[in-house]
Image (cartoon, rainbow, N blue to C red):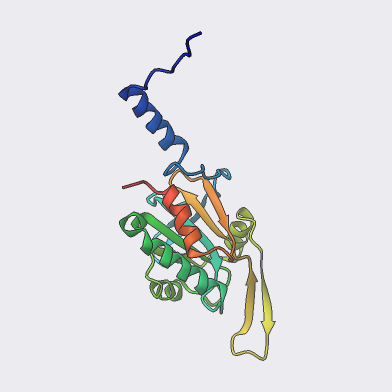
Amino acid sequence: MKRQTSPNPGPRALILTALLCSLLYSGCGPLLPDLGAAPELAFGAASSSSGAPLRIPDPEATATLVYFGYTSCPDFCPQTLSKIRRAVNSLGRRGRGVRTILISVDPERDSPELLRRYLEGFGLQAAGVSPETAALRDAAHAFAVDFRRVESPESALRYTVDHSTRLFVIDARGRLRARLSAESSAADLVELLDRLLPAF
C-alpha cells in the first residue's frame, strides 16, 4: 500500500495560517486572558490633573494602566510608577500610546495640581484624578480595590492610607487583560504590553 503524503501548502494557505496565528496569538505566544469589560468611569475636569475630563478606559490609548495610590505613599506607589516608566520606555515608540491613570485614595491632600507635579517626575504619559468621596468609593468598588485611612498622630503626615496595590491593564477595546500584583516586575509588564500593543 502506498503511503499517502500531504500536499505542500501553497502560498494562500501559508498566508491564511499566518493571519490565524496573528489573531490567536500576539507574537505567536500564548493568548492573553480576557477578564471581561473594564469598568467605565468618567471624571470631570476639576478633579483631573490634566485640567480636562478623564475617562477610563482612555479612548485614545493603545493600552490604559490604572493604579490606585497617593502622592505621600512611601513605597508601593513610587515603585509601581517607576516600574511602569521602565516598561514603557523599553517599548520605544510602541509605548507612546500607553496611558497611565493614577486614582488618588487621598483626595484630601492630593489636589489635581499636586498630582500633575508628582506624575511629571516619573516621565509618563499619565494623568491623575482626585475624586470626590463618593466618586472614589464608586471607582474603588468597580475595580474591587480596598483602601483605608490609618491615623499616625506622631507622624508629620498625620495619617497614611493602606490600599490595594494591583495594577490594572486595559486594552484598546476596553477589555481588562491583567491585574498585576506589586511583586510583578518591569519585565513582566513589558512582556504583557509587547503582546498587547500593535506591532507598529
Expressed as whole percent of the image width and height from the top left, the position of residue 87 reads 43, 63
Q: Residue at x 43, y 35 (%)?
A: 21
Q: Residue furthest top?
A: 1
Viewed as shown, does residue 89 lie left or right of 42?
Answer: left
Expressed as whole percent of the image width and height from the top left, the position of residue 177 reads 53, 48
Q: Residue furthest front?
A: 1
Expressed as whole percent of the image width and height from the top left, the position of residue 136 reads 59, 62
Viewed as shown, does residue 188 lie left or right of 143?
Answer: left
Q: Residue at x 44, y 48 (%)?
A: 195
Residue 93 location, quadrant: bottom left
Q: Height in image: 123 above or below 193? A: below
Q: Is residue 10 visible?
A: yes
Residue 157 location, quadrant: bottom right
Q: Height in image: 147 above or below 151? A: above
Q: Is residue 125 visible?
A: no
Viewed as shown, does residue 10 lie left or right of 162?
Answer: left
Q: Residue at x 48, y 14 (%)?
A: 3
Q: Residue at x 42, y 74 (%)?
A: 113
